[in-house]
Amino acid sequence: MAKAIPSPKAVAPRHRAGGKAAVKLLSGGNPQIAKGYGEEPVQAYLQAIPDWKHAVAVELDTLITRAVPKVLKAVKWNTPMYGMEENLYFMGFHMTKNYIKVAFFHGALLEPLPPDASTRKLVRYLHIREKDVLDKKQITAWVKQAAKLPGEKM
């Protein structure tokens, strides 16, 4: 019999390195991480994600880093952000109750278009749900395209 996946509220938040206080989980299991720049805050965010979303988020971070080795990372608004210039980001992702919301800030310029629309004209999303199989090739292609476009000031 398959083991049931606990809800985000049922999972104890992971502790930060060095024994600091546990990370608070916001709605949808999105970790509350202080604004920060570089690998450390992004890794703290990834390590605090509960349930199935943890492995998917780590995989996304790995795909982004492999596709764009010189990518700059930050956590802003409890969201890992990825860019090519300081404070200019081409994408980010965060947790919602039912899926991981991957945002391409100039996604309307990507080919093919990421599947999910936004109220913002240029933004497109990819919603990844628990049973979805990641199309690593397509995600990598979008990341490479997005990294070549102007970043959004955040």
Image (tube, rainbow, N blue to C red):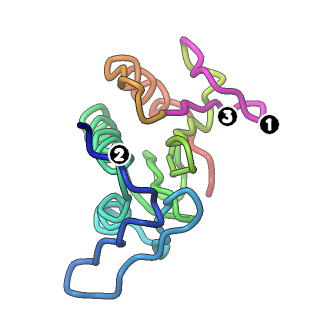
Between disc 3 and disc 1, the foreground one is 1
Q: Position of residue 89 (x, y in %)?
A: 52, 48
In the rendered image, which quarter contains the C terminus? bottom right
Residue visible at 56% across and 19% down in the picture: 110
| First of labels 1, 2 by sequence position | 2
Distance Cα–Cα, label 2 vs label 3: 26 Å
Q: Are marks 2 and 3 in contact (CB under 8 Å)?
A: no
Residue 17, above or below 75? below
Q: Residue at x 19, y 85 (%)?
A: 18
User: Within the image, what quadrant is residue 17 found in?
Assistant: bottom left
Q: Quadrant of residue 69?
A: top left
Q: Earlier in the sequence, mark 2 or mark 3?
A: 2
Secondary structure of residue under mark 1: loop
Amino acid type indicated by mark 2: Trp
Residue with the most extreme top position: 112
Q: Which residues are magenta?
A: 112-128
Q: Which residue is mark 3?
A: 123
The residue carrying mark 1 is 119
Q: Nearer the viewer, residue 117 or 24?
A: 24
Residue 92: give x, y in percent of width and height: 50, 46
Report if residue 9 lies within the magenta region.
no
Q: Examine the rendered structure and indicate whether residue 47 appears above or below residue 131.
A: below
Amino acid found under the numbered disc labelled 3:
Val
Residue lying farthest to the left in this orientation: 18
Pointer 2 residue? 52
How crowded pointer 1 is (Cα within 10 Å; few <14, some 14-19, many 20+) is rated as: few
